[in-house]
Amino acid sequence: MLSVFALLMFFPDRSPLKTYRLDLFDAYQTYLPRERKSAPVVIIGIDEASLKLQGQWPWPRTRLAELIDRLMSYKPAAIGIDIIMPEPDRASPSRMADSLPQISPELRRSLKSLPDNDHLLAAALTGKPVVLGVAGFDQATPTTAPTMRTAPIVAKGGDAGSYVRKFKAVLKSLPELEDAASGQALLTADLEKGVVRRIPMIAAVGNVLVPTLSLEMLRVAGGLPAINVEVGSRGIAGVGLDDIRIPTQANGETWVHFSKFLPERYLSAADVFAGRVNPEMIERKLVLVGLTGLGLLDYQTTPRGERVPGIEAHAQLLENIFDSDYLQRPYWMPMLESAILLLSGIFLLFAIPNLTPRFSVILAVTLSATLFCIGFLAYRTTGMLFDAASLSISLSSMLGSLLASGFIETDRARNIAQKALQSEREAAARFAGELEAARRIQMGSLPQAANSFPGETRFTLDALLEPAREVGGDLYDFYMLDRNRLFFIVGDVAGKGLPASLFMVMTKALTKSIVTDEAADFTVLFNRLNGVLYKENPEMLFVTAFAAILDVESGVLTYCIAGHDAPWLINAAGSVEQLRGEGNPPLSVMEDGNYPTEGLQLNPGDAICVITDGITEAMNPAGDLYGDTRIPELLQSKGGNLSASELLKIIRNDVRTFVSNAEQSDDLTLLVVRWQGPRTT
């Protein structure tokens, strides 16, 4: 898995994790948008107000000519037009004359004698620092052209054409307008998942390099003869104009560093026509003319999730250039990310097997959080785009695989231990003579519920232990720690016979000694008990256990499970659920085992039913097991608001009915506590 993910990181554009990477890069700009330092660009929007004033779109090109003349009166540095005009103006007088057969010959001749609208627009463009936009196409159509007029682009260091985005044709304005303008430039930017994130600074139409609108406007504004392209061993390193150098990706694209949408970037064309413009907003500025009306369908989505006019991306790119505020993802970034993944993955491979699942998850979360912090810090301070998302997903997947492998191995070890346990139980049963006395001692050490709590009304309790042989390894115990706290425990020693019974007695005695000393701290109780049993255990036995303290006044139950089957909770209405907290190792398996506590608030009438596997593994003459599902079904149907003794009797009778005359295969222990509620006065 580590090798596969590292390979995906090395080729990010082919990775199935690309979507997550782009989402992270969008999050950078969403939560930490660029702050605009300078305002070199103004967008003249053909908006709703302009359409209301001048009529529906498309306008006669005489209106565009008038708009350009009015803009030029404010002395802009350059004008970029995000409008493509590939066909003659239908509003030209001569074309109107041809389209109106019903007019008189005199009116037709008069109309044909008037100047053509395209000629008037070309005249308005001539000698002005105006750049026309063109659209790139991957396939030629009847309306496209295979070439376009463009300024010279000088490549230094290699052939730039082999790296850049290539278009087979372009949709451009009429040749008359093309010749009159000071330049032409590409408007097209490829969308990724419907979002405009990158714009090509240079591309190719056929074999000819062409600039993007922003770059060509800077060339025209500076009166420069050519654009420089820096080609390195891994592709395009940057583009330049005089003393301006713009870093790019290897394919000539640049990531646009977006700020928030700012209405102050925009001026309505209606205000320009009406003369309601502060000259300082246009003088020596780069002016972009585009469609911004909501009904004109020239809107794009930014990484910030904002829907803005398409011309906005070029305006923000120009601000990036003037503020030298670029987003960069250098060619070496995927290599760095792959190296980080390999080092982190190798670290996890060695660390996880030596950690508990909880600390493994904490380690992985900490590592992922660190990577995300590095990504945001790199973006904030240097504009570098670091892919923490793919790294985090890769490492999380590895963690899941490692934990799953560990759980499988643990389950295999548990099965082996259970088989060994069965062998030990069979061997222990041979000591029949000694075991009868041991049985009397063992059973005599167990408390009897009937006379343990005279006059107690806050709870009812009953317990039952039936060894499979003369003596057994199951245990239970209960006693009051003080006036309000009831302690009870059920355990199952791994084995049967004399060794198991001795270990059971020792466990029971140690538990009472420690719990009386440690009060209600189960973590301390089980850790101490586990440590003592581990050291004083020459036969290498272990015991599963469930222990709890019930505050019989408040109904608060605090408990811990050590490798034991989780008990069942039966409420007064009869619904049944199993307590959480399984997964801890049995006592005496490992010296440094950790046993966290769990808590539960009981309601009056709630009961806790604790069993050992002698019930679930009880076998009938046909060899069928009683199983895990019969207990909750039985409690669901008959649990209700019964006393502890009644619940115990129902379960024991059901097990006996199922087993019939088959030999008992394992110790059977059952303890039921029902909390009646606090003492009433």
Image (spheres, rainbow, N blue to C red):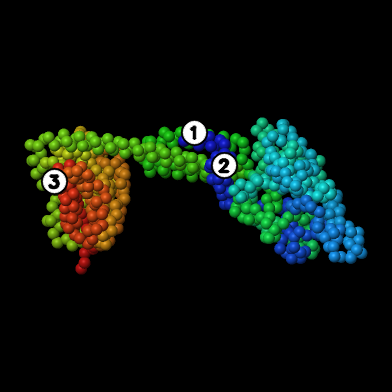
Q: Nearer the viewer, mark 2 or mark 1?
A: 1
How far apart, in angstroms, are the residues tagged by discs 1 and 3? Answer: 59 Å
Q: Position of residue 265 (x, y in %)?
A: 70, 56
Front position in the image: 145 or 677: 145
Q: Which residue is mark 1?
A: 3
> Label 2 is placed on what type of residue?
Phe
Q: Secondary structure at mark 3?
A: loop
Q: Nearer the viewer, mark 3 or mark 2?
A: 3
What's the residue at 54%, 37% (across, down)?
9
Task: Confirm or deny contact between disc 3 and disc 2 (CB under 8 A).
Answer: no
Q: Secondary structure at mark 1?
A: helix
Q: Is residue 162 left or right of residue 332?
A: right
State the count of labels: 3
Q: Quadrant of residue 485?
A: bottom left
- Disc ID at residue 661: 3
Q: Position of residue 188 (x, y in %)?
A: 70, 47
Compared to residue 231, the image places residue 118 above or below, namely below
Mark nearer the N terminus (1 vs 3): 1
Mark nearer the N terminus (2 vs 1): 1
> Label 3 is placed on what type of residue?
Asn
Task: Confirm or deny contact between disc 2 and disc 1 (CB under 8 A).
Answer: no
Front position in the image: 166 or 35: 166
